[in-house]
Amino acid sequence: MSLAIRMRERGWTVDLVEIDPQWRVYGAGISITAPTYRACKRLGVVEELLASGFGSHKGVRICAPNGHVVAEIPAQPIEPGMPTGGGIMRPVLHDILSRRTRASGATVRLGVTLETYTETADGVRVTTTDGQTRDYTLLVAADGAFSAVRSLVFPTAAQPIYTGQYCWRLVADRPADIDGVHFYMAGSVTAGVMPTSATQMYMFLLIHEPHKIRIDEATQWQRLKQLMAPFSGLLGTLRDGLSDRSVIIVRPLEAILLPRPWHRGRVLLIGDAVHATTPHLASGAGIAIEDALVLSQELEREPDVERALVRFEERRWERCRLVVENSVRIGQMEQTHADPAALKTLMAVSEAALREDI
Ligand SMILES: Cc1cc2nc3c(=O)[nH]c(=O)nc-3n(C[C@H](O)[C@H](O)[C@H](O)COP(=O)(O)OP(=O)(O)OC[C@H]3O[C@@H](n4cnc5c(N)ncnc54)[C@H](O)[C@@H]3O)c2cc1C
């Protein structure tokens, strides 16, 4: 969607095909870092994000299991007046981007996917599952961590790897004093809360599971209740309020960093399709939006499309590698109970690198 918006601004004709006929996204919250706000500002959606989400100007608060704040790590905005971090509900973010995509003049075809493609002399001929065949300058696949296009273009590429943790998320009402991110540590459990609007927040909880497991949706609230046993204070109250009506989303954490090239001829992969990360730096969606900004710049700057794709990958590789590798490393450190000071240092180094301009 970010790329469609950007390329329409540059006068390109854009067809967006989306496999889900309803174009839905699941109902969890998502954290927006300062660099992600910067990317959203450049995309022209930051005002809407702030109006419908929650931009925080606070630092990161570290809390005991009973909720008492034991430390506050100050945070600086990247640009004056911009939030230091924040959150939004995923369906709200999706709504902002999808309305912008349609308003941009991009043609959106839902319930449709790629069937085949062939290279032509100066582009790519694409057949989609709605029976249409069209010629394009470029085919960009942003079809997520389990990208079908990746399997088509790079059939021997590895699949995402399970990193040993599950992420539980719970949507809840926001108490007035939750005006920024709070982390809570209790033994091997890391949890946190992030505001997503004036009235809502989401809780995330990371737990080690040696293998992928099946979690029954009907009883998952009872499992979450057990996992939250070490907490009192705010998290204890959230736990005590859990029921079969609670909005809970649970996912195994999986990551992939596709080695370069990310393109073959005129077919390019971006976003999670090439760099799906665990959420430890809360940067997966941010770097996906940045991909769109950088790709549109390079396509404008460089008339030779294939050279533009190479330049795009050169600009994106180190930053995306850092996000995926350091996020996975932080998750490993949590699982092995590494020295908290070493963990804090790796987070600080990673966050400082991500503040660098793209
Ligand atoms: C537990 C968890 C928590 C996270 N928390 C954060 C966070 O706090 N902050 C953050 O920045 N990031 C976070 N992320 C990462 C973030 O969700 C992803 O990096 C981001 O969604 C990637 O965007 P994308 O557009 O590349 O892929 P996706 O969001 O996966 O979108 C892919 C789209 O392509 C469609 N599609 C799939 N297959 C096809 C096909 N064959 N044909 C056509 N369409 C197709 C899908 O329906 C979907 O609409 C988190 C990830 C996880 C797993």
Image (spheres, helix red, strand yellow):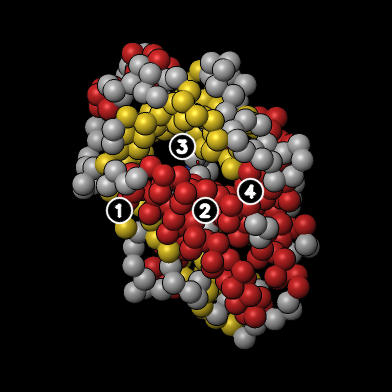
Q: Amino acid at mark 1?
A: Tyr
Q: Amino acid at mark 4?
A: Pro
Instruction: Give whichever of 335, 124 is nearer the camera.
Output: 335
- Ligand 1 within 8 angstroms of badge 4 C-beta: no
- Secondary structure of the residue carrying tag 3 is loop
Asked whether, in this view, residue 235 is left or right of residue 220, the answer is right
| As drawn, 331 above or below 47 | below
Within 10 Å of disc 3 (Cα), the crowding (few <14, some 14-19, many 20+) is few
Instruction: Give me the residue at 62% from left, 38% from top.
Output: 75
Position in image of residue 82 (x %, y %): 72, 39
Instruction: Give me the residue at 35% from left, 52% from top.
Output: 254
Q: Quadrant of residue 270?
A: bottom right
Q: Which mark is residue 221?
A: none
Position in image of residue 265 (x %, y %): 55, 80
Asked whether, in this view, residue 236 is left or right of residue 106, the answer is left
Residue located beneath label 1 in the image: 162
| As drawn, 236 above or below 17 | above
For marks 1 and 4, give the one nearer the viewer. Answer: 4
